[in-house]
Image (cartoon, rainbow, N blue to C red):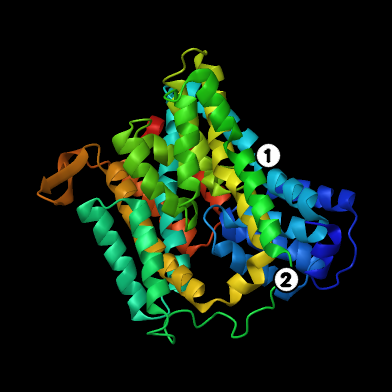
Amino acid sequence: MTTDQETSARPAMPPVAFGEAARVWTMIGFTSFGGAAGQIAMMHRLLVDDRKWIDEPRFLHALNYCTLLPGPEAQQLATYIGWVLHGVRGGLFAGLMFVAPGAMVMLGLSFLYAYGHDLPVVAGLFFGVKTAVLAVVFHAIARIAKRAFKHWVFMAIAALAFALLMFLDAPFPLVVIGAGLFGFMAQPHAPKIFGADAPVEAAPAREGRWGETFRAIVIWSGVWWAPVAFAALTLGPHHIITTLGVFFGKLAMLSFGGAYALLAWLAQDAVSVKGWLSAAEMADGLGLAETTPGPTILVTQHVGFLAAWRAPAPFSAPVAAALGALMTSWATFAPSFLWIFAGAPHMERLRSNKRLAAALSAITAVVVGVMSYLAAWFGLRLLFGESGWGASGLLRWPTVDLASFDWKAALLSALAFVLVMRLHWGLVQVVLVMAALGVVARFAL
């Protein structure tokens, strides 16, 4: 895309020096705690309110577009605004800087976890972190449900998604795709329920947008899959590094709803099927991701780290784990650049499409059900030392050993709920406090 084309696609805005923008994106990358909601609020305050680099309608337009996409919407929003300000180089810098600091911190925490989780103090820290996770997930459910349940139909969609996952072990991607298709098909028959928030008038089409899209798809698809292809050629198609690239590449195309919804798929596949890590280690990874800047979806990096740590050949465990973490993060975040740079020529028309808005509404509702399943899945494993599944034909149901009830976990989880839901503490504060109390519980109770 040329600079003239980009400029003609946007309203006039005050020029911003690239160096100045780079400093702001770097600051955001190192301080963007609090998950997607907090990160989006921070960008709005810094870029719209304080510096006025982008106006309110354009910011909301970008946010609406990014919520249509799979993957981390906050990173995609940063990439989009960077593109608005300085074209492709601005989008690249903003998107990479939004992720890189948190990814480096997460890698360090994963090494600490791998080397020290058997030590009593470290075990206590992670025990406390897990008790905070349940409250954090319920808080996210309440926040999304408030936005999603505009009609009882959306509540029914969420309940159906929960039942399909909990009692029929339905594949997560099919549940999400099915919800999107339902909303897309239902919109013409129930326009007051589905797609009512989309703008009435479509934006005019721009000349050359299909050529721009084709070039972006070719270039960024190649960039996305090149490391995976290199790993397959040098290490083999079945090596853990290659497997991680393929697995998280597929996940990146279907990860609607943010990190919490994505964990339902990880719980099904990475834990139950592939055995890369345990349910408790998954909860630990989510807790670690909540303490770092950047997207919460960095939890996937912890999964890749542990998977490669346990199957390191021909590398040492630390080298393999670092490569696994790098491949996982690349496969998770690189697609965002494809979605933004390929979709930019069409984003105005996508935003005005009522059927796509209806699909998004249905997906947002199903995310509530998916996250509720995740909360139940985590909660049973946190509160009971022995849990599993009963089954009869196609049906299954959760089972627990009541004698394995962990009263310490229940007590700390209740406290975390009070801090998050009633006192409205920040997520980082809650995680740090609960980590400290986890050490106290291990040694004093």
Q: CA distance from mark 1 to mark 2?
A: 37 Å
* Front residue of this view, candidates 30 and 415: 30
Residue that sits furthest to the left in the current view: 392
Q: Quadrant of residue 182?
A: bottom left
| Residue at the image position 40 percent from the left and 30 percent from the top | 443
Give the number of callouts: 2
| Residue at the image position 69 percent from the left and 54 percent from the top | 79
| Residue at the image position 25 percent from the left and 42 percent from the top | 384
Q: Quadrant of residue 231?
A: top right
**Amino acid type at image mark 1:** Pro
**Amino acid type at image mark 2:** Arg
Work out whether residue 104 can be spotted.
Answer: yes
Coordinates of residue 371 in the picture (x, y in percent):
38, 57
Which class describes the residues within 10 Å of circle 1: few (<14), some (14-19), or many (20+)?
A: many
Disc 2, SS: loop
Which class describes the residues within 10 Å of circle 2: few (<14), some (14-19), or many (20+)?
A: few
Q: Is residue 433 above or below residue 351?
A: above
User: Which residue corresponds to mark 2?
Assistant: 206
In the image, 213: left or right of 88?
left
Q: Is residue 322 above or below residue 382?
A: above
Disc 1, SS: helix
Coordinates of residue 404 in the picture (x, y in percent):
20, 38
Q: Which of the labelled discs sits on residue 101, or is there none?
A: 1
Of the two numbered discs 1 and 2 on the same chain, state the one appearing first in sequence.
1
Work out whether residue 111 can be spotted.
Answer: no
